Amino acid sequence: MTTALRSIAAACGAFFCFSIQAATVVVGEQLPDTTLLAGVQSTSEATLTPAALAGIAGGFTGYRLELIQWWGYDLADPDNAAAPFEVKFNGAVVTGSLSRDAAGALAADANSQPDTRLFLYSLDLDDAVNVSLTGANSLSIWNMAPDSDWYWQTSGSADEADMAFRLAASQPDNNQLPEPASLALVACAGVGLLAGTRRRKTVQNPTH
C-alpha cells in the first residue's frame, strides 16, 4: 500500500473511532460515599420490592441507553462472589454483560476501621437491547442471590433517593456523526478512486 493509501486508511480509521467515542455520553450520575456504610437494602429475599430511583436522566429523550453502573456492598458475602442482579429500566428488565470492580472499603461509622468492600457494578447492555430514554426515567436493582444481604450504596444519606448510579447513552441518529457503515463506504470509495487514478496514470505514462 502506498503512503497516500495508508494516510487515507489511517484518517478514516481515526475519524471512525472518534465518531463512536463522541456518540456516547453520561446522561445521569450520582456518586457514592466511599467511606461509610450508607446503603439501601435491596435483595429478593429480604425486601418485598427492589430499591428504585425515579425521575433520573431527564433532558435526554430519544437517547439509547448503553451502560448502567451502580455501587453496592454485601454484608453476608463481603467478596460479593455471587451477585446475580435483576435490573429494570423504566419498568422493563434489561440484560447485558455484568462486570464488577473493587471501589474501596467502608466503615460502620467514623470511629471504625473500614472492613466492608464496596464494589462498582457495570452492566454493558446487549446490542439487541434497544432502550430509549424518556423525559423522566426510572432504575431499579435487586440482588437475586440466596442469603444475600446486599445494599445499594448512596451518596451518604442512606436515603433511597440518593442511591449512586451512572448512565451512559448514545445520541439519537439525527444528532450523530455519519454511521459506521456510511464511513466505511466513503473510505472504500476514496481508496478505490485513488487506486483507479494511479492505474490510469500508469497506463498513460508507461515506464520504460
Image (spheres, grey):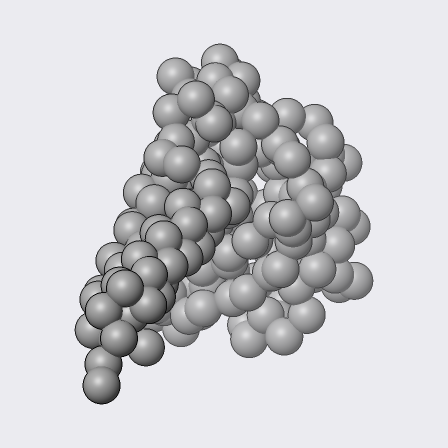
Q: Position of residue 104 (x, y in %)?
A: 34, 68
Q: Position of residue 188 (x, y in %)?
A: 43, 55
Residue found at x 64% / y 26%: 90
- The residue lying furthest to the top in this view is 135
Residue found at x 68% / y 41%: 129
Q: Where is residue 4 in the image (x, y as percent from the top left)?
A: 21, 66
Image: 49 above or below 62: below
Place residue 7 in its image quadrant.
bottom left
Image: 32 above or below 104: above
Q: Which of 148 and 200 is in front in this view?
A: 200
Residue found at x 51% / y 46%: 181
Q: Which of 187 and 141 is in front in this view?
A: 187
Q: How many marks?
A: 0
Residue found at x 53% / y 36%: 65
Place residue 154 in its image quadrant.
top left
Q: Is residue 46 visible?
A: no
Q: Position of residue 92 (x, y in %)?
A: 72, 31
Q: Which of 174 and 34 is in front in this view?
A: 174
Q: Which of 17 and 206 is in front in this view?
A: 206
Place residue 8 in its image quadrant.
bottom left
Image: 53 above or below 189: above
- The residue lying furthest to the front in this view is 208
Instruction: Tell me the quarter of the image containing the C terminus.
Output: bottom left
Image: 80 above or below 23: below
Q: Is residue 161 visible?
A: yes
Residue 47 relative to residue 18: left or right: right
Instruction: Tell me the quarter of the image containing the N terminus.
Output: bottom left
